[in-house]
Image: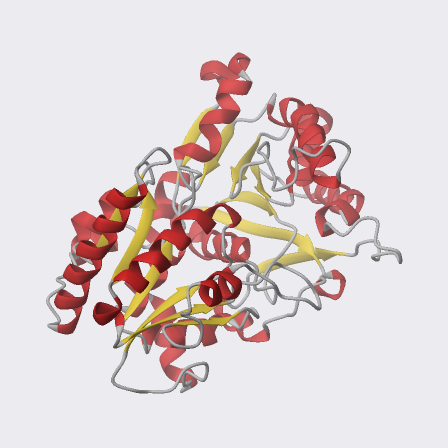
Amino acid sequence: MMRKILLIASHYPPSNLTAVHRVRMFAKHLPTFGWQPIVLTVDEAFYEEDLDPELLALIPEGQRVEKVSAFRVTQPRVIGDVGLRAFFQLARRASELIRCEKIDFVLVFIPSFYLALIGKLLFKRLGVPYGIDYIDPWVHRFPGSDRKFSRHWFSTLVAKWLEPWAVSHASLLMGVSEGYFKPVLARNPHLGSKVKTLAVPYGWDTSEYNVLEQMNKKAYLFKQSNKLKLVYAGAYMPKSDHFLAMFFQTIVENEALFVDVEFHFIGTGKASLHAQTSSIQQLAEQYGLFERIVFEHPLRIPYFDMLIHIRESAGMFILGSTESHYTPSKLFNAFMMKVPVFALLHKQCSVNDLIRSSDWGLACEFEEQQANDVFKQAIEHGFMEWWKKTSNDEWLMDQSLVSDFSIMQLTKPLA
């Protein structure tokens, strides 16, 4: 008989938030390793973001998904976090499932960060072991959290209060990389050897390329031309501004090298219902590059639309931030769509070695204290090398190494 695992997440398809893809891929492949998943989530009628119904094609037939209601967003908007608005409903339904069925383990995905508290509550009430997957760090400095009594300042304070209680009896702490959960252990040394830890990157699902092929989609955000197009896919990290500025400055100083190149930033806007904003356009205009070499399409587009734009590009552009723990999930889309990577990443980023060892692109590494001119030279020479190898189709993807990062293989150690 298969063991049962309850996966608790605030979002699930047809939501197209990044964290959704991690939950759905684990849920798909856990049965291969002897675990029957039950996904507990919030009904999409209570989501605020636009839905992506095509994602439902990636949910296996017969997968069990339990949905609960949530409190509506009030006007004026006081609480937007759907995990908080559905906290009591999720906790109540989880308790019912555990009482009615033999649930062997509960795995909570954060964000929404408040869901971590449900794991501890279920353990205290019903004795079921639980784990927490840190898709994003819970306790960290939000932009603006240094301003006392601001919303972000308060969120950081609350996180510092709540996290120790939430993790105190966890059996498992996991994350996209060690950098996501190691600070949790440092803040809570009493956990010691009582908790298992596991670093599992996003990975990629080999079957999704075939699903995309059947859809007969075409790229629509850029026109076909002789120019080499690189796509930056997804949200833009606020702490990337300094390094993006240096990159744009390098382009200006070496414009002959970039005259036949276009960078398309897609889905970069901040998560807002009606306004999509970022600093990319403003920065590109400052350097005279906007809609010449640099293009931005800030609205989030459906998942398969994003994949087709990546597939029809010459490469994927990845930009890290000053936060060394940041692990870009978009790297695995480059593997899946078979386009090489050009990346600017923190020296301690966990995927630098993977890009290098897989021979599927090039990563220019930076450190906070690095002199600007040194980094700009690295970009200049790095991009020249990337451009030549891409133009001559000289990248040789190490298929055996890349296959180790399929979500099927990555689910095995979790199981």
Residue plotted at (27% across, 80% down): 227
Q: Residue furthest right?
A: 75
Looking at this view, is 282 or 22 the one in front?
A: 282
Left or right: where 209 falls relative to 26: left
Residue 154 x %, y %: 74, 33
Image height of 302 relative to 411, above or below: below
For the question of whether residue 415 can be seen, the reply is no
Looking at this view, is 218 or 267 the one in front?
A: 267
**How was the colour assigned to the protein in this rendering?**
secondary structure
Q: How many marks?
A: 0
Quadrant holding the C terminus = top left
Looking at this view, is 330 or 104 the one in front?
A: 330
Image height of 406 relative to 99, above or below: below
For the question of whether residue 57 can be seen, the reply is yes
Residue 65 x %, y %: 62, 58
Left or right: where 125 falls relative to 242: right
Q: Quadrant of residue 325?
A: top left
Left or right: where 253 falls relative to 264: left
Residue plotted at (47% across, 63% down): 286
Q: Quadrant of residue 223?
A: bottom left
Residue 190 x %, y %: 54, 12
Left or right: where 260 falls relative to 282: left
Image height of 136 relative to 31, above or below: above
Residue 97 x %, y %: 69, 44
Residue plotted at (13% across, 65% down): 389
Residue plotted at (24% across, 47% down): 354
